[in-house]
Image (cartoon, helix red, strand yellow):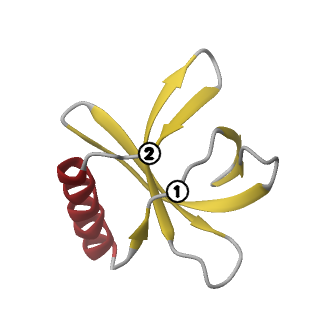
């Protein structure tokens, strides 16, 4: 599977779809593919609804009552570990 690193700064939640609001104000609706943790860090995999897009993978944290912060995964070892775990989850779901 191919995963993309992507930078988005805000998020709003609706059922199993998240609307990412990018820095330029562009909104991207995404399906939630998986939510998982590794070593007390939480990750979320999203698939943009528009055809032809790839899964995007973020580290995330929750704060307040309904706030979510998405973070790029800049460390290559952490990225590989998160992709491996996502692959495992996707295989289990087949």
Residue 6's tag is 1
| 4 lies left or right of 69 | left
Lower position in the chain sequence, tag 2 or tag 1: 1
Count of marks, rendered view: 2
Residue at 33% from the left image edge and 72% from the top image edge: 93
Q: Secondary structure at mark 1?
A: loop
Q: Quadrant of residue 13?
A: top right
At 17% from the left and 51% from the top, the residue drawn is 77
* Closer-to-camera residue (76/58): 76
The answer to whether the residues at label 2 and label 1 have Cβ atoms under 8 Å apart is yes
Q: Position of residue 63 (x, y in %)?
A: 54, 19
Q: Is residue 67 left or right of residue 28?
A: left
* Viewer-proximal residue among 53 and 75: 75
Pinpoint residue 6: horizontal percent, then vertical percent: 52, 56
Residue at the spot 72% in from the left edge and 60% down from the top edge? 29
Q: x, y (%) of residue 80?
A: 21, 59
Residue 70 percent across, percent down from the top left: 52, 39
5 with respect to 19 (left or right): left
Name the one closer to the observer, 17 or 45: 45
Of 9 and 31, the residue lying toward us: 9
Q: CA separation, marks 2 and 1?
A: 7 Å
Up-down: is 68 above or below 23? above
Quadrant where the C terminus sits is: bottom left
The residue lying at 60 percent from left, 15 percent from top is: 64
Residue 28: numbered disc: none
Give the residue at mark 2: 72
């Amino acid at each position: 599977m191919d995963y993309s690193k992507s930078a988005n700064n805000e998020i709003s939640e609706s059922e199993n779809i998240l609307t990412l609001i990018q820095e330029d104000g562009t909104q991207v609706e995404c399906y939630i593919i998986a939510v998982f943790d590794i070593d007390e860090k939480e990750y979320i995999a999203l698939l943009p609804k528009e055809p032809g897009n790839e899964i995007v993978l973020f580290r995330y944290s929750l704060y307040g009552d309904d706030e979510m912060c998405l973070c790029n995964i800049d460390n290559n070892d952490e990225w590989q570990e998160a992709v491996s775990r996502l692959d495992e989850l996707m295989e289990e779901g087949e």
